[in-house]
């Protein structure tokens, strides 16, 4: 009978297990993608300079397209009730493409527009009580603290969709095609810049207040 002393040991050498576990931990930390918090990417306008005099009320009014939402999710657009949020996009497009009192820069924008957009401006974009030009147009959105998140996002989607359609039409593309332009590609970046030249995406989001019902 073989002696027990000659039998191989059945114990597992665990001396290096701690090192292996440490290396695996480092590996997963390096390769794992951490989830980022989702939010609304929006560049807010800078605070007004207190040393500068405020603009005239009438001029300020006509260059600002005002959207308000109350705690009952009711919309007030340009001081008028609006029941269908989908009507926002065409209204904003008319506001952006209005040339009521165009500056020289705005006229350069107009001259650069394709024929269909010039026809649109001729039909809808010569109002003196609307924006002076695309370079002055600002869309302002103010919500109530009780406004639902769904309406808040829907309104912002409509506002951005209006800008994207204008940008796309300016270079003969759809809004989706404009959004898919690769700015790392020189030719596509040139188209992107051409679409937005003289037409800033001027969206002002005011801090929510208690507007009421």
Image: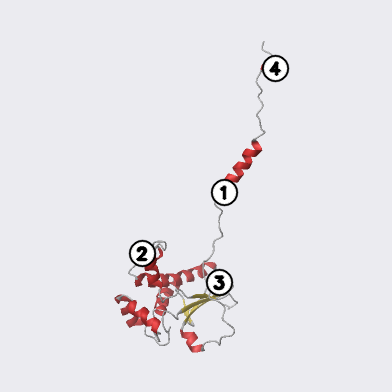
Residue 147, numbered label: 3
**For the residues marked 2 and 3, what is the alpha-carbon distance in whole angstroms?**
42 Å
Which quarter of the rendered picture does the C terminus lie within? bottom right
First-in-chain label (3 vs 1): 1
Instruction: Tell me, yes or no, if residue 175 can be seen here.
Output: no
Labels 1, 2: front one = 2
- Mark 1 Cα within 10 Å, few/some/many (few <14, many 20+)? few
Q: Secondary structure at mark 2?
A: helix
Q: Which mark is residue 5?
A: 4
Sequence-wise, the earlier of marks 2 and 3 is 3
Mark 4 is surrounded, within 10 Å at the Cα level, by few (under 14), some (14 to 19) or many (20 or more) other residues, namely few
Residue 86 position within the rendered picture, expressed as x and y whole percent measured from the top left = 43, 72
Callout 4: SS: helix
Tell which tag, 4 or 3, sits nearer the viewer. Answer: 4
Between tags 2 and 4, which lies in front? 2
Where is mark 2, residue-wise? Answer: 187
Left or right: 213 as drawn, with respect to 116: right
């Amino acid at each position: 009978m073989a002696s027990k002393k000659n039998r191989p040991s059945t114990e597992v050498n665990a001396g290096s297990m701690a090192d292996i576990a440490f290396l695996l931990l480092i590996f997963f930390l390096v390769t794992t993608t951490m989830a980022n918090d989702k939010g609304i990417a929006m560049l807010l306008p800078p605070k007004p300079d207190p040393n500068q005099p405020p603009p005239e009320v009438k001029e300020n009014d006509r260059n600002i397209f005002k959207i308000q939402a109350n705690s009952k999710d009711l919309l007030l657009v340009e001081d008028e009730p609006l029941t269908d949020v989908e009507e926002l996009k065409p209204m904003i497009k008319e506001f952006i493409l209005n040339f009521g009192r165009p500056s020289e820069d705005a006229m350069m924008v107009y001259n650069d527009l394709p024929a269909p957009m010039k026809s649109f401006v001729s039909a809808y974009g010569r109002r003196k009580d609307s924006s002076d030009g695309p370079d002055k147009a600002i869309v302002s959105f103010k919500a109530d603290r009780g406004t639902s998140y769904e309406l808040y996002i829907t309104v912002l989607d409509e506002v951005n969709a209006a800008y994207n359609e204008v940008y796309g039409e300016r270079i003969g593309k759809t809004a989706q095609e404009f959004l898919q332009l690769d700015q790392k590609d020189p030719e596509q970046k040139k188209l992107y810049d051409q679409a937005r030249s003289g037409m800033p995406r001027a969206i002002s989001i005011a801090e929510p207040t208690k507007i009421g019902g």
